[in-house]
Image (spheres, rainbow, N blue to C red):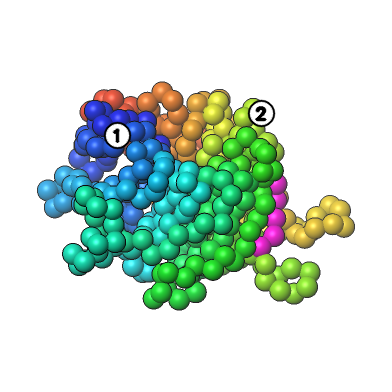
Amino acid sequence: MTAMETESTEQMMSTGAPSQLIQSMHRDYIHQVKFDVYGRRIATCSGDRFVRVWELQETGEWMLTSSWQAHKSSVTSLDWAHPEFGSILATCGSDNHAKIWEEQNHTTAATTTTPGSNSRWVVRASLTEARRGVTCVEFAPRYWGLKLAVGSSDGCVRIYEAIDIMNLTQWPLAATLQSFAEGSNKGCTSLSWSTGRFEAPTLVAGGSHLVLYRYAKNSTGTQAWYPLLKLPSPDKGDVLSVAWAPNVGRRFHYIASAEDSQLRIYKLSRELVPPTSNSGGAVPTVLSTQTIPTHAWQVQWNVTGTVLASSGDGGKVQLWKTNGSNEFELVSEVHGDQEGNSLPAQMDF
């Protein structure tokens, strides 16, 4: 969830206890907070150009272990790679760059970071193809290899892949997808990969609308990325955040999008059906769409895709879950300015 806190404010981060408040130590707005796969490390990025990494100690306390200047301007997004590839972070910023960082255990790593920073992280690659600020990065699920999707304000989604995971300095550009008009308000604002392991690699990009892409054979029989489906534009403004629900045995997909004054949840079929016209390939069916009037800037699913969290400008996180009618309803709220927050005992994750 995006947090809008400064150095003097405290942030709530969940541990085994109901909540824990820690000082962010950032000097500007925090743009993103990301847990690693195991939930024992947190990375934060901010408008102060810094990235900070926190680790959960045996005492249950979060300790700051690394802090470094990652970009020459605001750091807008970051993501952890799966640990089977090593300890790797991707970051991006309004300086038009996305960067690949690797954690080192040796003190010699300090020679490649910003002087005065406290970090074991070294930059391995800078991805500079974006023509405007880079807004979002997300690694693909591990079973599709070490791939990274990068969205930028120029309206493009770019797919990079580390062909040799032992050489993180080489990230060839595999595809450039002009998803939104370059003159659009914000370009590409968010990305999310499908986790369907037995389906072709698929992702959704958010901006002036939502568009799904799939990597599969095209009409010439070669593998390529192609637009799979375009979903309707928000009633006003752009999509601010999009999240593809993890699929654990369901026969359909959920995609949630935050659209400022509303939260929208799409239910899509896993099977592709032939198009109604002669143009284009098979597409998924939109089974249902639910629109919830609430302020939503960020959305994220839990690991089983059964609970959706959304956050807006009210300093609270709302948790949504399906009821007996398969409609999402509000089941809990967590307020960031109250220490005693906890989830209800009947909450099933």
Residue drawn at x 57%, y 65% is 173
Q: What is the x, y in percent for residue 139?
A: 47, 58
- Where residue 278 sits, quadrant-wise, is bottom right
Say whether disc 2 or disc 1 marks the residue closer to the N-terminus.
1
Q: How many marks can you see?
A: 2
Q: Which residue is the site of mark 2?
A: 235
Indicate which disc residue 338 carries: none
234, above or below 65, in the image: above
Q: Is residue 229 magenta?
A: yes
**Front-most of residues 55 and 103:** 103
- The span from disc 2 to disc 1 (Cα, nearest Å) is 34 Å
- Secondary structure beneath dot 1 equals loop
**Front-most of residues 37 and 69:** 69
- In front of the other: label 2 or label 1? 1
Q: Which residues are magenta?
A: 225-231
Q: Main secondary structure of the magenta part?
A: strand
- Locate the N terminus and report the quarter of the image it occupies: top left
Q: What is the x, y in percent for residue 251?
A: 59, 55
Q: What is the x, y in percent for residue 247?
A: 51, 55
- Secondary structure beneath dot 2 equals loop
- Where residue 61 sits, quadrant-wise, is top left
Indicate which disc residue 27 carries: 1
Q: Does the image show residue 2?
A: yes
Q: Is residue 6 magenta?
A: no
Q: What is the x, y in percent for residue 60?
A: 16, 46
Residue drawn at x 24%, y 37% is 25
The residue under label 1 is which amino acid type? Arg
The residue under label 2 is which amino acid type? Asp
